[in-house]
Image (cartoon, grey):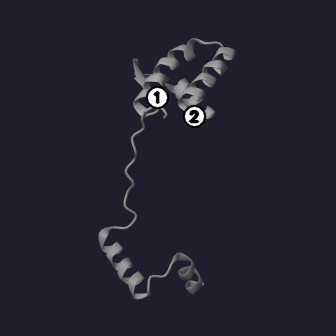
Amino acid sequence: MGLTMKERKSVVSEIAKRYKKASKKQKGIILDELIALTGYNRSYASFLLSSHEKIVRMNNRVLKVDLTMKKKKKKSKYYDDDVKKALIKVWDVLDCPCGKKVKTCSS
């Protein structure tokens, strides 16, 4: 049985400290170690180690940023509720055509 997500995150945070101080050859060895332990893809593991607690400077302030935790953007609505209701009615009246049928009927 593999590691839990919490265990993987703690392993990455510990290994990232060594990874940042290591030479290029040592980084390859550390990366192989992490891949064997967690089962991550090599490029993803490399991204995690290099971006862990990255330091960003903004307006004379130093911030530690965890780039692995991204907030999802909320998508704006393409159609408002009135238009959506009308489109559903039209789609229902036309006997629920798929996109391919609609394209062939209109051309």
Determine which of the numbered discs, if any, sits on residue 8 in the image: 1
Kindly indicate the quadrant of the structure image that contains residue 80.
bottom left
Which amino acid type is shown beneath numbered disc 1?
Arg
Q: Is residue 10 above or below residue 4?
A: above
- The residue type indicated by label 2 comes to Tyr
Residue drawn 43% across and 27% down? Answer: 7
Q: Position of residue 8 (x, y in %)?
A: 46, 29
Q: What x and y, as percent, mark residue 52? A: 48, 24
Q: Which residue has dot 2 on it?
A: 44
Query: Is label 2 or label 1 in front?
Result: 1
Which residue appears at 60% of the width and 22% of the height? 33
Contact? badges 2 and 1 (CB < 8 Å): no
Asked whether 36 or 44 is in front, the reply is 36
The correct choice, above or below, for 21 with respect to 13 in the image is above
Q: Position of residue 14 (x, y in %)?
A: 47, 18
**Residue 54 visible in the displayed image:** no
Left or right of 4 on screen, residue 37: right
Within 10 Å of disc 1 (Cα), the crowding (few <14, some 14-19, many 20+) is some
Q: Quadrant of residue 75?
A: bottom left
Question: Foreground: 61 or 15?
Answer: 15
Extreme residue in the left direction: 82
In the rendered image, the vertical position of residue 82 relative to residue 64, given as above or below: below
Can I make out residue 99 in this image? yes
Q: Earlier in the sequence, mark 2 or mark 1?
A: 1
Provide residue 67's location: percent of width, then percent of height.
Answer: 46, 31
Q: Residue at x 55, y 82 (%)?
A: 101
- For the point 41% across and 18% down, the residue is 62
- The alpha-carbon separation of the residues under discs 2 and 1 comes to 13 Å
Q: Is residue 37 left or right of residue 3?
A: right
